[in-house]
Amino acid sequence: CVCVWFSKLEAVQSERSELQQQNEKLELHCKQMENRMESAVVQPTTNEEDRLDQIQKLETTILELRKDTDTLSEQEQSMHRTSSTQRDRIQTLELQNTQLQQQLSTMANRLSEQSDTSEGLQFELLRTQDFLHKRMKSAIHLKQEVIQLQNE
């Protein structure tokens, strides 16, 4: 039971590590998007075609950023759900651990009681054996006296 608890704890820790790595990747991705946004903004020009081209680039970048923002939001929600699931698992494991500790304590108490009872029974058995041994000696002695009296 304790081994199961440790293996579940290791799995939760592994998932947590993976989530941290995902979070770091997402932060890096956000920084890259910011850099792309900054690089998309260029110097103003007087040429109408250049301005239209710049506007298209900006619109494309904005659409990509919105898509990436949606993706990041979904990933954040997924991480939140996973985190909640892990918290629930940890609470469940802690509860199971507490229950196992209580069971171990109860079993230790029972074994102690059984040991005490066993020692008491062994003592009573020795007393009974001693009593029976004395009675047997007494019976043998009486039988010898009866035989002796019959012979006389």
Image (spheres, grey):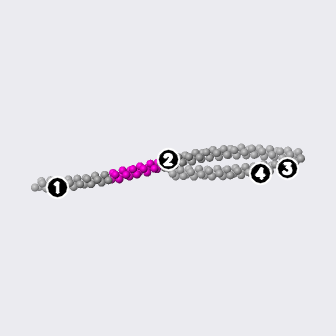
Element at label 2: helix
Q: Which mark is residue 144?
A: 1
What amino acid is labelled 1 in the image? Gln
Judged by its main secondary structure, the magenta piece is helix
Q: Secondary structure at mark 1?
A: helix
- Residue 14 inside the magenta-drawn segment: no
Marks 1 and 3, how far apart in space? Answer: 132 Å
Q: Position of residue 5 (x, y in %)?
A: 53, 50
Residue 103 placement (x, y as % from top left): 46, 48
On the image, numbered disc 3 is attached to which residue?
Answer: 43
According to the image, label 4 marks what residue?
A: 35
Q: Which residues are the magenta region?
A: 103-122
Residue at left offset 63%, top offset 52%? 17
- Residue 108, percent from left and from top: 43, 51
As measured in the structure, the alpha-carbon distance from the residue carrying label 4 to the one carrying label 2 is: 53 Å
Q: Look at the numbered disc 3 and give the secondary structure of its residue.
A: loop
